[in-house]
Amino acid sequence: MTYLLLTLLWIAWCAIHSGMISLTTTEYLKRRLGTGFRFYRLFFNLFAIATVLPLFAYTNSLQSPVVFRWQGLLAGVQVSLLAFSALLFLAGAWQYDLLQFSGIRQILTGSFHHGLSETEKFDTSGILRITRHPWYLGGILFVWTDDRNLDMATLVMNTILTAYLILGTILEERKLLKQFGDEYLVYQKSVPMLLPVPWKKPARPTKHDSEDQASREKST
């Protein structure tokens, strides 16, 4: 019964978190809130943090049996994956606009768009040449490698969060495809969604303005 409750709580958090940032919700709130919508991203982030911390605390408070340990040679694998996760986050932070991600830039400028870049530019440089979503991949690796011992409660949490991150990646793909159209479709075919392919040559770095792309399409 304890694990069922834990499962339902994590699924509920993921569903609420995903629903709050969905295209349907954000487009509706844009129409209703007008200029006030610029505060929504910051509110969304603060709400997500405030609601997930009690869930983490509850999960860690459960006395559940350990089902897996990163030990022996696996300890080296854990450290390597954790380091790769940190590298993905750092490389992603270099490409993304952290003010946009936090919601501060929206407040300062009053603008909002689906991407994490400072402008509407389509960017495939840096880490985005080998994986389309470095932060999602980094998040998946992190949830499985941040603790040496995986107990049953952590296993439940990690499984749900992994499924949520994969689903979030797919939903993000739909937003970006809607925003950038055929240009993003070409990018999808040349760069993996999550796992980099070692033998595949990185995509050519590009930065295009979506408005320029739209104007070129209208002129053809």
Image: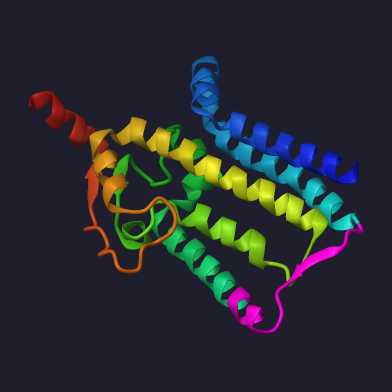
The residue sitting at 36% across, 53% down in the picture is 192
Residue 81 x %, y %: 56, 71
Q: How is the rendered protein coloured?
A: rainbow
Q: Which residue is farthest top?
A: 32
The residue sitting at 49% across, 16% down in the picture is 31
Q: Is residue 52 visible?
A: yes
79 in relation to 18, above or below: below
Residue 180 x %, y %: 29, 35
User: Quadrant where the N terminus lies?
Assistant: top right
Q: Is residue 171 left or right of residue 39?
A: left
The residue sitting at 64% across, 78% down in the picture is 74
Magenta stretch: includes residue 2 = no
Q: Which residue is farthest bottom?
A: 72
Q: Quadrant of residue 116?
A: top left
Q: Which residue is farthest left?
A: 220
Q: Is residue 35 left or right of residue 3?
A: left
Report the front residue among 66 and 27: 66
Report the front residue among 205 and 1: 1
Residue 215 x %, y %: 16, 29
Q: Is residue 103 visible?
A: no
Magenta stretch: includes residue 75 = yes
Residue 166 x %, y %: 54, 46
156 in relation to 44, above or below: below
Q: Quadrant of residue 175?
A: top left
User: What is the tally of numbered marks visible in this picture?
Assistant: 0
167 in relation to 142, above or below: above
Q: Which residues are magenta?
A: 63-78
The residue sitting at 79% across, 38% down in the picture is 9
Report the front residue among 67 and 76: 67
User: Quadrant where the C terminus lies?
Assistant: top left
189 in relation to 85, above or below: above
